Amino acid sequence: MSERNEKNAEKGQEVAEKATRHRFAAAYKAEIVAECDACAPGKTGAVLRREGLYSSMLTRWRADPNAQTLGTTQRGRKANPKTQELARLKRENERLAKRLW
């Protein structure tokens, strides 16, 4: 039983107070994909049930173009290239100004 389920059992609850998003490590994802790929036809479902996963997760993990970097893509807002260039130029300007003095 997971730690969260144990805490809920102590409180007499069956369902968690607040749902949490599952996060899987890249190594875990790679391990499950390899295990499912090695399974005999029709046995993948047993692995997914044992691990509490959905087939859509496995499909997404397999479709990742960077199989070595499963789960390491940055989510959310991406940095503006102009902002990055501005920061680089400011650093270079400071370095050159120090060199002059």
Image (spheres, rainbow, N blue to C red):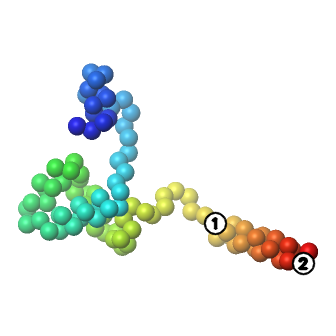
Q: Nearer the viewer, residue 64 or 47?
A: 47
Q: Is residue 59 visible?
A: no
9 w.r.t. 86: above or below: above
Give the residue type at disc 2.
Leu
Q: Look at the numbered disc 2 and give the secondary structure of its residue.
A: helix
The label on residue 80 is 1
Q: Look at the numbered disc 1 and give the secondary structure of its residue.
A: loop
The label on residue 51 is none
Q: Position of residue 45 (x, y in %)?
A: 13, 56
Give the residue type at disc 1.
Asn
Count numbered badges in the picture.
2
Quadrant of the image occupied by residue 27: bottom left
At horizontal 35% and vertical 61% (from top left) the residue drawn is 26
Q: Position of residue 96 (x, y in %)?
A: 83, 77
Query: Could you tell me which quadrant the N terminus lies in?
Result: top left
At horizontal 16% and vertical 49% (from top left) the residue drawn is 50
Q: Position of residue 97 (x, y in %)?
A: 86, 74
Mark nearer the viewer, 2 or 1: 2
Query: Could you tell me which quadrant the C terminus lies in?
Result: bottom right
Would you name the residue on which mark 2 appears? 100
- Say whether marks 2 and 1 touch (CB < 8 Å): no
At horizontal 34% and vertical 54% (from top left) the residue drawn is 24
63 w.r.t. 20: above or below: below
Mark closer to the chain start, 2 or 1: 1
Measured in 3D between alpha carbons, the distance from the residue under mark 2 to the one under mark 1, in whole angstroms, is 31 Å
At horizontal 32% and vertical 35% (from top left) the residue drawn is 4
Does 91 sit left or right of 39 as displayed?
right
